[in-house]
Image: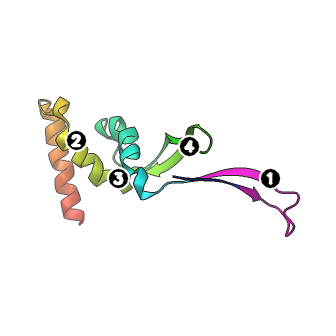
Amino acid sequence: MLCYEENYGADADGNRGEKQFVVEVEQSDCDDIVEALYELFLEDETTGTKTIMLYCARVGEDVEVEVEIDDYIAELIERADADEDIKDDEDLQVWLKELKEEQNNEQ
């Protein structure tokens, strides 16, 4: 994750600006994002924007990040396939199978 401060609204000399902290998600954050979205995914949240918390080393604490669930749907399905805790839940397995078929049809 990229974390940096910028002087928003400053003039050419860097005056009169307002310090803002900016966070940008990188591909390397995928596992952490999937972890944060997984419970929502199992509750049938498969589209839309969600605000999650991710750790930022620069500030030493969790920060809010907005992500699109759609961007991580393949990874969420993969994680659900590997989740032994939901293997015996027939309703979830049917839902997961339908979701996989839907994803394959879109590709």
Quick one: label 4 or label 3, which is nearer the N terminus?
A: 4
Q: Residues within 10 Å of mark 1 (few under 14, many from 20)?
A: few
Quick one: label 3 or label 1, which is nearer the N terminus?
A: 1
**What amino acid type should be assigned to the residue bearing mark 4?**
Ala
In three-dimensional space, the C-alpha distance between marks 3 and 1, rounded to whole angstroms, equals 33 Å
**Does dot 2 land on a helix, a strand or a loop?**
helix
Q: Which residue is mark 4?
A: 57
Q: Which residue is mark 2?
A: 80
Q: Residue 22 colored magenta?
A: yes
Q: Which residue is mark 3?
A: 72
Q: Which residue is mark 1?
A: 18
**Which of the pair 31/87 is nearer the observer?**
31
Relative to residue 43, is residue 54 drawn left or right? right
**Does dot 4 land on a helix, a strand or a loop?**
loop
Residue drawn at x 40%, y 39% is: 36
**Does dot 1 land on a helix, a strand or a loop?**
strand
**What amino acid type should be assigned to the residue bearing mark 2?**
Ala
The residue range painted magenta reads 6-23
Relative to residue 56, is residue 74 drawn left or right? left
Residue drawn at x 20%, y 36% is: 83
**What amino acid type should be assigned to the residue bearing mark 1?**
Glu
Image position, residue 95 (x, y; %): 19, 42
Quick one: label 3 or label 2, which is nearer the N terminus?
A: 3
The residue lying furthest to the bottom in this view is: 12
In three-dimensional space, the C-alpha distance between marks 2 and 1, rounded to whole angstroms, equals 43 Å
Q: Is residue 1 above or below residue 55?
A: below
